[in-house]
């Protein structure tokens, strides 16, 4: 490893190519006159050209210093399809392509994002965030941006103010979770056009909703990655999903530029409101500053220039405070799965993956009080090591919690959601626990009305060996279930089973009466959280008490007393500070709201009482 101080990436730097002015970095650009230029990092290449596949004409790029090739292509315009030619005989798509209309192995296409013009939009602060994670392919019948756009008014009515889109980068075939992307600048053709993305963001902003993007900067997908033809984008060290990105080895400066420019592209050119960054714990960089710090600094600088909030969330999952420390990586918040593990394992004991490290009542108390259960004193049987540090000094707003997400559902043997695993009663208790906690809440699409369709792992690779390897991998992962044969990730029906079933093609969601009940419950939880009635991010205003003998946890705010009964027996609210003057604001048991004469809290239920 080498340790070198790289220059800070400037979001508004320009260079001149043949007298024309262009944004500095890597990839394809269009200047104010509509002229197209390329700047590509290819240090091991003798010559590099761009071929217009429509005309067959080749345009040779000039080789500059430090392995960069650049040039203007006056005949190119939006819609032009092209290939790169390395050393005059190796033809392949552009790894910095903005669009792949026929998939990852076909010619690239000149395309650019269309930024929403709305000077009044200021974004959403992490302290106000109610996050909704969704997968475009399964969220609507259409499975694309146009289909999801139709549901934005529904999400506004629900109370959502941050949509987290699972990855959009181009991938092989017609369906994928998104974590096998190979063109990080390219909106997948399966999800629509840049006009569709513009319209989606515009509609979201008009409804007071920010749109953040889940980005995968830790590896490339296993099919359709042509970046290695140009530069050493990866190194031998592995992640669970492939080779690590080369952020600090030989010829890594242009690779760092690629990912920094990708950050600028989605936040500045496309106008997205931030990132959820996938598995940053397997992004390794010995440089100073670290690439992750450069990315968060760049994001904040864009927000400052544009006078709007850019939200940066890390999936680190090692429970370490440096992730959100301003002096280190500087993310606004980080994902934490510990509340999910603690609540899930108590309400429905299981013995696989991280769940086997949980199952005690004290785990729920610890996750509510400190955020991190993996706090340096607990052994992580998945990583075979002690992990994490105390969360006492980390602000609750710097931790995003959930009771289910794409991983925690999709990596169950049958892709079951919480309501299918443990039933409505316990599922609503888990949801109430999430929202009365002091942390930032995140929902996974469909949980707000009790969707019971699974969310299975699916792909549509073209390589038969890869398809078989994925099937074997899934079977091995669930080998703890005797005789279990997982649904084939490659079969289209696996994808279709994972679609939300409540969203018909007409305008009004055809939600059943029980689902309407759950939906109303979630709306009330979100409203109470947004209004500061429950779940204050200030721990001093969110006092947590635990009663192990009865399995009860109470959370007291300035306005409410919440009694969470994780035991099987009914308890009397009077034993936990509630009296006849405290009416029920919301209960996990229907038809109890407003009652004062029944202060008992049934087993495996919760009630929020007005002080």
Image (tube, grey):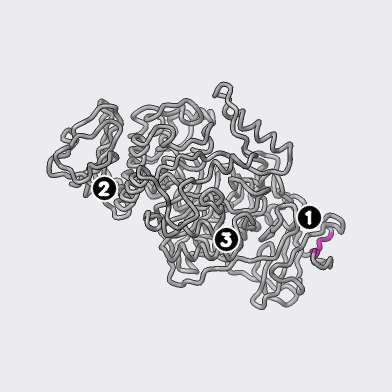
Disc nearer the start of the sequence (2/1): 1
Magenta part mainly helix, strand or loop?
strand
Seen at 43% across and 52% down, the residue is 509
In front of the other: 397 or 560: 560
Disc nearer the start of the sequence (2/3): 3
Seen at 40% across and 38% down, the residue is 339
User: Residue 179, how many percent across, how many down?
Assistant: 60, 46
Disc nearer the start of the sequence (1/3): 1
Residue identifier under label 1: 92
Q: Residue furthest top?
A: 482
Seen at 29% across and 35% down, the residue is 605
Mark 2, Cα crowd under 10 Å, few <14 / some 14-19 / many 20+, is some
Q: Which label was assigned to residue 266?
A: 3
User: Residue 481, how many percent across, how many down?
Assistant: 54, 24
Residue 50 within the magenta-colored segment of the rendering: yes
Q: Residue furthest left?
A: 580
Distance between the alpha carbons at the discs numbered 2 and 1: 58 Å
Report if the CB atoms under discs 1 and 3 are less than 8 Å apart: no
In front of the other: 459 or 292: 459
Instruction: Kindly state the secondary structure of the residue where label 3 is placed.
Output: helix
Instruction: Kindly state the secondary structure of the residue where label 2 is placed.
Output: helix
Distance between the alpha carbons at the discs numbered 2 and 3: 37 Å
606 shown above or below 557: above
Relative to 339, 456 lies left or right: right
Report if the CB atoms under discs 2 and 1 are less than 8 Å apart: no
Residue 374 within the magenta-colored segment of the rendering: no
Residue identifier under label 2: 541
Distance between the alpha carbons at the discs numbered 1 and 3: 24 Å
Query: On the image, which quarter does residue 309 sit in?
Result: bottom left
The magenta stretch spans which residues? Answer: 47-53
381 shown above or below 280: above
């Amino acid at each position: 490893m080498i340790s070198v101080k790289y220059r800070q990436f400037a979001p508004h730097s320009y260079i001149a190519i043949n007298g024309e002015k262009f944004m500095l970095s890597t990839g394809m650009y269009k200047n104010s006159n509509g002229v197209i230029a390329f700047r590509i990092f290819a240090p091991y290449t003798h010559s590099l050209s761009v071929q217009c596949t429509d005309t067959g004409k080749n345009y040779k790029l000039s080789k500059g210093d430090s392995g960069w090739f650049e040039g203007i292509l006056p005949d190119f315009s939006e819609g032009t399809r092209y290939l790169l030619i390395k050393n005059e005989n190796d033809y392949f798509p552009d790894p910095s392509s903005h669009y792949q209309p026929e998939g990852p192995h076909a010619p690239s296409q000149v395309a650019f994002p269309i930024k929403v013009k709305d000077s009044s939009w200021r974004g959403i602060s992490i302290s106000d965030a109610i996050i909704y994670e969704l997968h475009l392919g399964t969220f609507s019948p259409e499975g694309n941006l146009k289909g999801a756009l139709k549901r934005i008014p529904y999400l506004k009515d629900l109370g959502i103010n941050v949509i987290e889109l699972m990855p959009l980068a181009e991938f092989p075939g017609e369906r994928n979770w998104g974590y096998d992307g190979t063109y990080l600048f390219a909106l997948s053709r399966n999800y629509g056009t840049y006009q569709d993305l513009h319209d989606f963001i515009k509609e979201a902003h008009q409804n007071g909703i920010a749109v953040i993007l889940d980005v995968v900067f830790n590896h490339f997908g296993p099919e359709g990655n042509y970046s290695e033809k140009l530069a050493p984008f990866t190194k031998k060290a592995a992640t669970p999903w492939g080779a690590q990105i080369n952020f600090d080895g030989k010829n890594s400066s242009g690779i760092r530029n690629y990912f920094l420019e990708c950050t600028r592209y989605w936040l500045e050119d496309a106008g997205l409101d931030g990132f959820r960054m996938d598995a940053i714990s397997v992004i390794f960089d010995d440089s100073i500053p670290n690439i992750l710090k450069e990315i968060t600094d760049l994001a904040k600088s864009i927000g400052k220039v544009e006078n709007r909030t850019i939200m940066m969330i890390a999936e680190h999952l090692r429970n370490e405070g440096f992730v959100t420390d301003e002096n280190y990586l500087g993310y606004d918040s980080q994902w934490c799965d510990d509340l999910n593990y603690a609540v899930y394992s108590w309400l429905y004991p299981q013995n696989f993956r991280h769940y086997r490290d949980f199952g005690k009542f004290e785990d729920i108390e610890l996750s509510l009080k400190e955020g991190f259960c993996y706090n340096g004193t607990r052994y992580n049987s998945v990583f075979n090591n002690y992990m994490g540090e105390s969360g006492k000094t980390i602000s609750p707003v710097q931790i995003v919690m959930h009771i289910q997400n794409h991983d925690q559902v999709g990596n169950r043997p049958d892709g079951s959601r919480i309501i299918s695993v443990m039933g409505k009663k316990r599922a609503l208790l888990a949801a109430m626990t999430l929202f009365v906690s002091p942390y930032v809440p995140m929902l996974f699409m469909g949980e707000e009305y009790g969707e019971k369709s699974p969310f299975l792992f699916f792909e549509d690779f073209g390589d038969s060996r890869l398809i078989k390897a994925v099937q074997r991998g899934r079977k091995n992962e669930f080998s703890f279930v005797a005789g279990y044969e997982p649904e084939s990730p490659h079969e289209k029906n696996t994808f279709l089973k994972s679609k939300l079933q409540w969203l018909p093609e007409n305008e009004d969601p055809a939600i059943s009466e029980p689902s309407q009940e759950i939906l109303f419950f979630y709306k009330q939880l979100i409203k109470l959280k947004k209004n500061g009635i429950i779940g204050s991010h200030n721990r001093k205003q969110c006092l947590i008490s635990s009663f192990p003998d009865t399995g009860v946890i109470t959370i007291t705010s300035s306005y409410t007393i919440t009694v969470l009964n994780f035991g099987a027996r009914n308890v009397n609210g009077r034993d936990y500070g509630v009296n006849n003057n405290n009416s029920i604001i919301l209960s996990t048991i229907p038809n109890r709201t407003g009652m004062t004469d029944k202060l008992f809290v049934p087993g495996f239920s919760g009630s929020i009482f007005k002080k």
